[in-house]
Amino acid sequence: MFLIGSNKSYFNVNKKIFFLILSFFVSITLKSQSYLADDIIKIAENNLRETVGDYFFSYFKFDENSFYQYQDRKGNIKWARLKKGRQTKGKFLNAKQVVFIYKHPDFEYDYVNKRVYVHFDSILNLVEKIDIDRIPKFLLENKKSNWLNRTELNQIIDNQNLKKSARKINLRLEFDSRKKEYYWIVFNTIAIFDCYSDEEILHLDPVTGEILKHFEERQYLTNCN
């Protein structure tokens, strides 16, 4: 009886030691697959600097709305914010949204996406080339803007003999993702109703002022009864 009891006690002790050792190695494995957020940001900055050059890189700032994916101890895949001074959680899987925003005095247009994304895999290799198509060439090349100014744009619009406006003409800068180029979209409201308006619309080349499109469209308000 004593021998059996001893064997049972010996088995229980070994079982506890086994799980302690297993937990230790799991902890080491998880820790080895986590990173300091500052290191991830630094590597991202280096890749971005290499892509845009030293001059334009100085206009970028890290966006705190950056995220990474990790796996917790239960195997669940989760998102977490990439915070400076913090260690990443669990088993690091990727950083698909390391975000930087640029602000340049020659490109201060409203409602324009000025974010650039750096995507990393689990070992902080770039998943894909950093997309900088939305950054005008004159900025990257540190040259004077060759875009038309607002006065010149207004003159071109005035020369189009547009229909009588129901309210002030509105301009907005847009980016064509397929053609990878910017254009100005001009809204001339010619009629206003409760839940929609009739618009005369122009698309203008920002450099030459060429009229790319000229059409009319009825635009409906959302959540309007």
Image: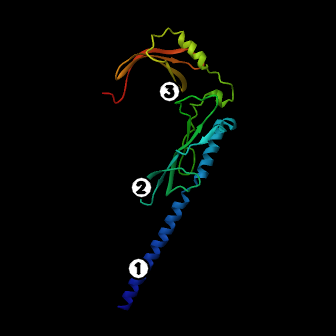
Relative to 12, residue 132 above or below = above
Q: Secondary structure at mark 3?
A: loop
Whether tag 3 and tag 2 are in contact, CB under 8 A, the answer is no
Q: List x then y, in percent, for residue 91.
A: 50, 57
The furthest residue to the bottom: 2
Pick whichever, 201 or 42, lies toward us: 201
Pick whichever, 167 or 28, lies toward us: 167
Q: Residues within 10 Å of mark 3 (few under 14, many from 20)?
A: few
- What is the distance, in whole Å, between disc 3 and disc 2 at their CAs? 36 Å
Q: Secondary structure at mark 2?
A: loop
Which residue appears at 54% of the width and 50% of the height?
A: 82
Q: List x then y, in percent, for residue 202.
A: 49, 16
Quadrant containing the C terminus is: top left
Q: Tell me which numbered mark, 3 or 1, is placed earlier along the sequence.
A: 1
Relative to 120, residue 13 above or below = below
Check residue 158 in the rendering and tell me which mark sits there, or answer none: none
Whether residue 16 can be seen here: yes
Instruction: Say which residue label 2 marks.
Output: 76
Which image quadrant is residue 45 in? top right
Whether residue 208 can be seen here: no
Q: What amino acid is at disc 3? A: Arg
Whether tag 1 and tag 2 are in contact, CB under 8 A, the answer is no
Check residue 178 in the rendering and tell me which mark sits there, or answer none: 3
Q: Tell me which numbered mark, 1 or 2, is placed earlier along the sequence.
A: 1
Which residue appears at 40% of the width and 84% of the height?
A: 9
Quadrant containing the N terminus is: bottom left
Q: Secondary structure at mark 1?
A: helix
Q: What amino acid is at disc 1? A: Asn
